[in-house]
Amino acid sequence: MRIVDQLHDQAQALFDALRQGSLDPVRGGVTRDTYGPGEDFAHVLMARHASSIGLEVKHDFMRNTYMVLPGLDRSLPAIVIGSHLDSVAGGGNFDGAAGVVSGLIAVQALKQAGIQLPCDVVVMGVRAEESIWFQVSYIGSRGALGRLQPEALQARRIDTGRTLAEHLTEAGGDPEAVQRGDSFLSTQNVRAFMEVHIEQAPSLAITGFPIAIGTGVPGNFRYPKIRIQGEYGHVGLGRRYRHDASLAGADLTLGLDAIWEQWEREGRLMACTVGEFYTKAEKHGLTVVPGEFCMSLDVRAYAQPDLVELEAAFLALVRQVEQKRGVTIDLGPRASAEVAQADPVLTKQLRECAQALSLPHCDLPSPASHDSAAFCAAGIPFGFLFIRNPNGSHHPDEAMATEDFMLATEVLAQWLVRQQGTQ
């Protein structure tokens, strides 16, 4: 028997309220800025709903929000369901938030059905997953798990120029807890982490499945502030005399794309993104040979050896371009995240729930990074569900149907029901 169907309108109302409260009139879409007013609004909204349905609400030193349905034995490790509530600037309404709403709807259905699990069920609204704001991955979840490096506190938000420590303090958090390496969550008090998320490539839309069982989250290496130094020159300067920084940037980008094309021919999964690509505005001009060029790089894959191989190939490409163009390439700070495989037992159980409900589904590796990876790195097993989204993500046109959302939430709820006799 399905137990979440009667909550369709409740889910829709939460999504509508999220959108209305974080609309971005300038960029379109929504902006729920990390450790800013937009993200704060979303956390308050979810906490108020949780309180209205009788859940306990608390926060940690990162200001993550925890909405708790008590279990029969509160000393047992909890099941945590969650995702993030921040967004990119001018993003879509469902990226991340769908996972928090799904958890709340599933728990509300359990409560209405009078079902109490042996352990607490915690819906977690995670802070600061979107790394675009501070150029650091998994800030909220890594912080809660005691795995956020203290130097991340000095990272500056790209629009305000203020540090993470300042923003965290302003939000009511405690940077000193990060400095000490405190952990709010661990293998001692968390049994499993479950995440529901919209797909971020149109795989399900193309194949026709409304939901998928997530099998893994890619790892990555990132260089967010690559700087290429050449020589500024006159527009009439001959090619042999130039040290053109912008052409060096183009060589790097096209070289990476050639690597990706080769991997694709070989059936090997990877992706690379040059998200920033620019000359210095204060010096560039129509008649100036660029002497300085900046770019960012994100490279991801599904196996740790693949990441090692890709980074070695990239570093070799850097040396080749330096020699070819007569430039110096400063890669700047490096960041990375490990590959995370979904727990095979949890994955099997989610498949069984979907099958029992006669829901069409498939397996799907994630093309994007998710907080589940931070839990995996901390030794906590995770399960993952995807919801069909034909229009991609990180822009206003995300197109998750509430009907598809309810199917994924039903699978989650049925998985919870099956945990009544386990611990």
Image (cartoon, helix red, strand yellow):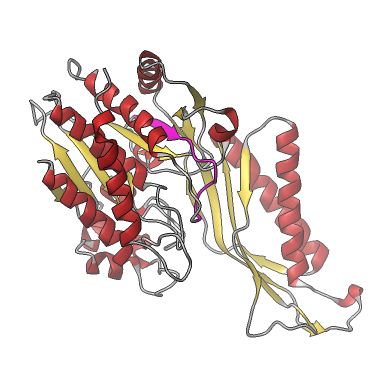
Left/right of residue 73 with respect to residue 373 in the rendered view = left
> Can you say whether 143 is above or below 209 in the image?
below
Where is residue 56? Give x, y as percent. Answer: 11, 43
Identify the image quadrant of residue 346.
Answer: top left
Where is residue 118? Give x, y as percent. Answer: 13, 23
Q: Is residue 392 magenta?
A: yes
Q: Which is nearer the eye, 45 or 308? A: 45
Q: Which residues are magenta?
A: 382-395
Is residue 106 visible in the rendered structure shown here?
yes
Where is residue 371? Give x, y as percent. Answer: 38, 43
Quadrant for the C terminus in the image: top left
Identify the image quadrant of residue 307.
Answer: top right
Q: Residue at x 71, y 50 (%)?
A: 256
Left/right of residue 299 with respect to residue 338 in the rendered view = right
Q: Residue at x 52, y 57 (%)?
A: 334
Q: Which is nearer the eye, 41 or 130? A: 41
Left/right of residue 279 with respect to residue 205 in the rendered view = right
